């Protein structure tokens, strides 16, 4: 297990480069063998479905649903998580889409990925900056419960705006397949591990869960670009636009989250617990729903987002000392006045 943990940490620390490699390999194979990709599209889609489950299921094992009732005892961070993810993010995403995107499928893809918070690395970043892991875990579980309820509403609204027919039955089926089923199966698995091997076994298996999720995501990204390689080459300007939109969104969100959390008087630990959860998106789940309910083109924004998400998150981690001083400033001022 130590070797697995070492490999998982290496992959996590270099996920941006591996994501770039997955995109490059998938895109290259799709351009070199376009007939193969077209001829075997059904087989590749089945492979993606299998990879999707292996990507989402291990992540759900890490969620502790028993902590959700505790949200009522200290609801402010959780309320702010909902505000960041389901009020500010949709409005900001819709603005970007209206101004910069004119392709309905890409617009749906952007909204889809932006509305699914909680990257698999959010808790990892929270731990690195000494944020409240308990708040982060509860907040992640809370938003995952809200996503299946709110996602169809937002996507349906966007479909009407663009006059695109949304296959709501397929969309709801996709949400059920990649969120609801893995959530409950993952919870049952977690309970079984804790009952059979207790916390020690669960702790030993966590690196394996992370490794499976990351490897599955990389293969999924590669297959997506293999399937859409010729189309993306023709639309290289679209890829550049998506990169710029992603950069703009992340820069604005990290600044807004920091300022708003300070205004409502969250402490540093609470802020860091929800900052990464709110700014970072669950690309794997977005890719899964896009592939099950729509087309590979809808999944492209979710495949591109991780590259910049990692850069901004690592940058925010490196600024932890400055952010801590920012959140502790009022307390320090009070201490000075008291003395």
Image (cartoon, rainbow, N blue to C red):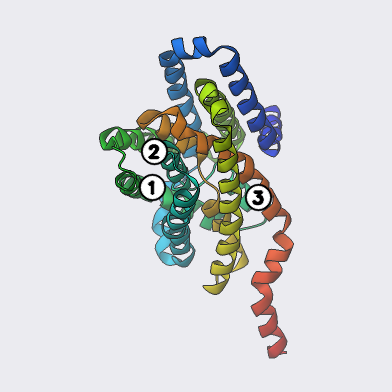
Left or right: where 335 falls relative to 69: right
Q: SS of the residue at dot 3?
A: helix
Contact, CB < 8 Å: mark 1 with mark 2? Answer: yes
Q: Which numbered dot is residue 147? A: 1
Residue 121 occupies which quadrant of the picture? Answer: top right
Contact, CB < 8 Å: mark 1 with mark 3? Answer: no
Look at the image and tell me whether residue 194 can be seen. no
Q: Which numbered dot is residue 104? A: none
Q: Residue at x 48, y 59 (%)?
A: 84
Question: How far across and down, in percent of the image, does residue 242 sit?
Answer: 55, 42
User: Label 2: which residue?
Assistant: 179
Query: Which circle's residue, 1 or 2, is located before the other in the chain?
Result: 1
Q: Residues within 10 Å of mark 1 (few under 14, many from 20)?
A: some
Using the image, determine if residue 248 lies above or below residue 300. below
Q: Quadrant of the C terminus?
A: bottom right
Q: Residues within 10 Å of mark 2 (few under 14, many from 20)?
A: many
User: Label 3: which residue?
Assistant: 312
Q: Nearer the viewer, mark 1 or mark 3?
A: 3
Q: Residue at x 71, y 34 (%)?
A: 10
Left or right: where 262 falls relative to 142: right
Q: Quadrant of the N terminus?
A: top right
Q: SS of the residue at dot 2?
A: helix
Question: How far across and down, in percent of the image, does residue 297 sit?
Answer: 46, 31
């Amino acid at each position: 297990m130590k070797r697995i943990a070492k490999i998982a940490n290496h992959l996590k620390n270099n996920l941006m480069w591996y994501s770039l490699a997955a995109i490059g390999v998938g895109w290259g194979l799709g351009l070199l063998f376009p007939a193969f990709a077209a001829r075997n599209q059904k087989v590749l889609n089945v492979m993606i479905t299998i990879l999707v489950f292996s990507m989402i299921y291990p992540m759900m094992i890490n969620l502790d649903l028993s902590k959700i009732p505790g949200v009522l005892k200290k609801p402010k961070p959780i309320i702010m998580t909902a505000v960041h993810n389901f009020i500010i993010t949709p409005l900001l995403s819709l603005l970007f889409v209206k101004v910069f995107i004119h392709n309905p499928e890409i617009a749906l893809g952007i909204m889809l990925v932006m509305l699914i918070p909680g990257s698999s690395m959010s808790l990892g970043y929270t731990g690195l900056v000494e944020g409240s892991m308990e708040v982060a875990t509860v907040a992640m579980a809370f938003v995952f419960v809200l996503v299946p309820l709110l996602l169809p509403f937002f996507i349906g609204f966007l479909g009407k705006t663009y006059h695109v027919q949304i296959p709501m039955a397929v969309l709801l089926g996709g949400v059920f397949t990649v969120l609801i089923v893995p959530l409950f199966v993952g919870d049952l698995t977690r309970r079984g591990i804790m009952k059979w091997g207790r916390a020690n076994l669960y702790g030993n298996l966590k690196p394996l869960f992370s490794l499976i999720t990351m490897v599955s995501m990389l293969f999924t990204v590669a297959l997506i670009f293999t399937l859409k390689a010729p189309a993306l080459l023709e639309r290289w300007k679209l890829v550049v636009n998506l990169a710029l939109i992603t950069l703009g969104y992340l820069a604005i969100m990290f600044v807004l989250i920091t300022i708003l959390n300070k205004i409502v008087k969250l402490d540093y630990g609470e802020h860091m617990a929800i900052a990464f959860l709110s700014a970072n998106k669950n690309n794997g789940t977005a890719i899964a729903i896009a592939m099950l309910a729509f087309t590979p083109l809808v999944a492209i924004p979710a495949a591109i987002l991780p590259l910049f998400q990692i850069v901004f998150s690592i940058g925010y981690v490196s600024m932890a000392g400055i952010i801590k001083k920012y959140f502790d400033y009022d307390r320090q001022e009070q201490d000075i006045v008291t003395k």
